[in-house]
Amino acid sequence: MNSKILFLFILLSTLVLSQTHFTIPQNVWRLSFNQSIASGKWIGHDGEKGLKDLKYKLKGIDYSIDQYWEHALNAQEFILEYGFSDKSTFIIQVPIVQKFNEDHAWLISSDSSTVVLDDIMKFYFPNNKSNSGLGNVTVGMKKLFIGNPAWRGEGRKYSIYGGLDATFPFGQSLKKYYPKDIDDNGIPNQFKHLPISNGVTKWRGSLFGELYRKIKGRLININWSFSLSSYNRELINPSYSFLWIEETGIDSISKVIGNAVLFEQGKQISLSIQGQLELWPKRMFLSSGMDWMKSGRDQYFSNSDKWDTWMSSNNNYDTKKTLSTQFIKLNFLNIDPFKQYGPIPFELEFGIRWYVPYLTYHTFGYTSSWLKISSYFQAW
């Protein structure tokens, strides 16, 4: 669950219709560095925080479990773009997760004592996990199909682009379970591992564009984006749990499921709309907008059909996610050669993003902020 959500957050942090240029002129390099911080809690099927009322039965005793997850993330991203022509731009994005932290808490209700089940939960689900390292790397192309980009300032007052990119799982995926790989308390080290990547390759096609006009000497843009994503079916290490079966022994559970399973993440559709206003001609832009993402259901293929079904969806939980976010950002430009300060052209961006309550389900609702600096270089 967690690696998929982290990857989703990093993706959405770059989905914002960034900067003022979708493509850049021929033989121009754009180098960008983005620093972001975020925190968020799991949002359940009812739009409330937490996964509520999970039913479980052990040794004839009925339990109800409420679970709560909270994430804190500190990440950097390096972005390199190159204009092959005025209409096509190559891009590579390399995220670095500086700190990824997860807190996991629960409440157990039953007519009988909950001590035994609470101890089992502590064994399988450590209250705190953390990790850091390289994230998933994205490589892609963007191409202008129709119209003129706003940076040209001539001809048609609109543009339509297409994009194709692939995201490769360079980040750490979940460790493999080994019976003898345990800590001093006998807890498998896999249970304490917080993966950065879900271990699958993503393919995304996108269509996006802009409408722009000058009103009273100020440039006004309306930007939009639509994308479809699919994922390779990959062999991954399963995340073991006892909550789907009346058996709590990890060795028995691992034998039922298997040491590796096939995983296919559900396809995704994403939409974005953004309005942008030029506050200070050729210097400062204010933007605000909204993103929306809907995913299909994940599929698992293990030795146990029951576990496969339970992992895809179960009582009050589903891998079909809906995520809605809003954002506002401010861009300061120092790229006009007649107004440029200093020898190096650059652009600064500061943004804030937050999830929309009751339009977000079965995923983490994040609040985040970022600071991004970009610079342009000519290749002769």
Image (spheres, rainbow, N blue to C red):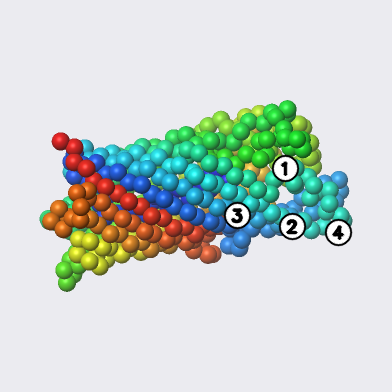
Residue 368 seen in this snapshot? yes
Q: Which residue is mark 2?
A: 107
SS class, disc 2 = strand
Coordinates of residue 139 in the picture (x, y in percent): 36, 37
User: Which of these two is toward me, 114 or 100?
Assistant: 100
SS class, disc 4 = loop
Q: Which quarter of the figure is the N terminus placed in?
A: top right
Observer-side mark, 2 or 4, equals 2
Q: Is residue 129 left or right of residue 271?
A: right
The residue lying at 86 percent from left, 59 percent from top is 111
Sort mark 2 into few (<14), some (14-19) or many (20+) by Cα contacts within 10 Å: few
- 91 lies above or below 39: above
- Residue 111: assigned label: 4
Three-letter code, disc 2: Leu
User: Which of these two is toward me, 220 or 372?
Assistant: 372
SS class, disc 1 = helix
- Residue 70: assigned label: 3
Three-letter code, disc 4: Asp
Sort mark 4 into few (<14), some (14-19) or many (20+) by Cα contacts within 10 Å: few
Q: Which residue is mark 1?
A: 124
The residue lying at 66 percent from left, 29 percent from top is 259
Specify which label sits upstream in the sequence, 1 or 3. 3
The residue lying at 49 percent from left, 44 percent from top is 97
Specify which label sits upstream in the sequence, 4 or 1. 4
Observer-side mark, 4 or 1, equals 1
Q: Is residue 17 left or right of residue 122?
A: left
Three-letter code, disc 3: Glu
Specify which label sits upstream in the sequence, 2 or 3. 3
